[in-house]
Amino acid sequence: MTILADYLKQYSSNTAVNDVICTIAEVGKTINKLLQRGAFADILGEAGNQNVQGEDQKKLDVIANNLLLDALTQCTHCAGVASEELDDATPANQSGNLLVLFDPLDGSSNIDINMAVGTIFSILPYQRSGSPITNTDFLQNGEKQLAAGYLVYGPATMMAVTTGNGVAMFGYDPDKDAYLLIKDHVQIDADTKEYAINGSNYRHWQQPMQQYIDEVIAGKSGTRGKDFNTRWVAAMVGDVHRILCRGGVFMYPFDNKDPKKAGKLRLMYEANPMALLIEQAGGAATDATHRILTIEPNDIHQRVPVVLGSKNEVAYVQQLHESALKI
Ligand code: AHG
Ligand code: MN
Ligand code: MN
C-alpha cells in the first residue's frame, strides 16, 4: 500500500508543499480521534463566541483551528496562515515560502448530530519570504494554488489531495496509524443525475437557479428528459467527496436572503481548494458566470456563489445564467 508521504514524493517535487500536506494530515488524525470520542472528549456544543463573519463558533471549530494553527506555525515552510476562524492572517515562520489557508471544521452544524464534517486547505506561494506577512499576501487567485485538499471525517476518515497532478484519495487506517492510497487519478463523469442544493432557499434565488431546479425536479416529464436525485450533506466536504466518488453537481448560489453577501461559501478556503480538486478530476467550478479559479480576491473572507461538479451539468447551470444576463 502507498502511504501519503510516498505518494507525494512521487507526484510533487515541492518538498515544502509535501511537508505542509503531511502536517495537516497529522492534525487530521487528532481531529479524527476527538470526533471518535465525541461527547466524551468534550468537543460538542457552542464555544460561546462569534467569528469575524458573525457566525457562532462551535467548540470543535475553535479546537480544530487551534490544532492547525499550532502545527502550521511550527512548520518551517509555512510563512503564515489564514483561517475561517481568525479575523486576520497570522504569521508563522518568516523564512517560509508558503501560505496556508484553511476551514478548520467544515459543516459545523453536523458536529452535534454525529454526521460527516471536514477540514479544507489551500496552499499558496509566498513571494516575499523573509518579510512579515500581511492579509494582502494571501489575495492570490485560485490558479496560483500549489496544492489543495480536504479531510472528511465520516464513518471513515479520508483525505483527497491535489498538487496539480490529478487527485488522489487516501483512507486513514487507525490500525496502521497511516493514510493509505485508495484511489489515484480520480475522474468525475461529465454527466450526472444527482444534485445538491439547500432547496429551502428557493424563494431567495435568482430566476436561472429557480429554473434549473424546476427542470431537474420535473425529471423525465420535463425538458431534461431524465429523473434526478437530491443529496445534501450540509457539509461541503461531504458533498464534494460524494461528487469525486460518483459525480454530481453541488450548488450554493447567490441568494437574496442577505443580498450584501455574494454567497454563503468563502472563496479562499472553501471554493478555491474545492474548485482545484474538482477541475483536477475533470469537473468544472463556476460562480455561475466565471470560472472560480480566476476570480481575483479582495478579502481573505470574501464570499462567492458556487456551482461545481460534473462538467456538462455545471456548464448547463452557467448557460442558464448567461442567457438570463443577455435578456
Ligand atoms: P462552515 O461549517 O465551515 O461554516 O461551512 C458550512 C457550509 C458548507 O459546508 C455547507 O455546504 C453549507 O454551509 C451548509 O449550509 P446550510 O446550513 O444552508 O445547509
Ligand atoms: Mn465551511
Ligand atoms: Mn468552518
Image (spheres, rainbow, N blue to C red):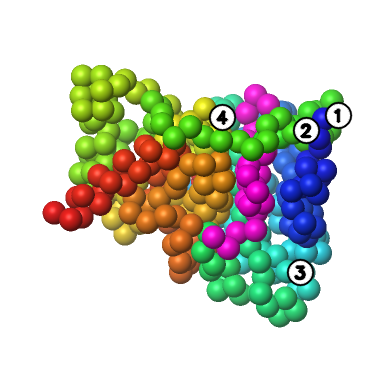
Q: Residues within 10 Å of mark 4 (few under 14, many from 20)?
A: some
**Contact flag, marks 1 and 2 (Cβ < 8 Å):** yes
**Closer to viewer: mark 2 or mark 3:** 2
Residue most extreme to the left: 327
| Measured Cα–Cα span from mark 2 to mark 3 | 28 Å
Question: Label 4 sits on what residue type?
Answer: Cys
| Measured Cα–Cα span from mark 4 to mark 1 | 24 Å
**Contact flag, marks 4 and 2 (Cβ < 8 Å):** no
Q: Is residue 7 left or right of residue 264?
A: right
- Which residue bears the numbered disc 1? 176
Looking at the rendered image, the quarter that the C terminus falls into is bottom left
x 19%, y 50%: residue: 324
Residue 96 got which mark? 3
Residue 25 position within the rendered picture, expressed as x and y whole percent measured from the top left:
74, 44
Question: Label 1 sits on what residue type?
Answer: Lys
- Which residue bears the numbered disc 4? 245
Looking at the rendered image, the quarter that the N terminus falls into is top right
x 61%, y 54%: residue: 122
Q: Is residue 97 left or right of residue 302?
A: right
Q: Is residue 211 left or right of residue 176?
A: left
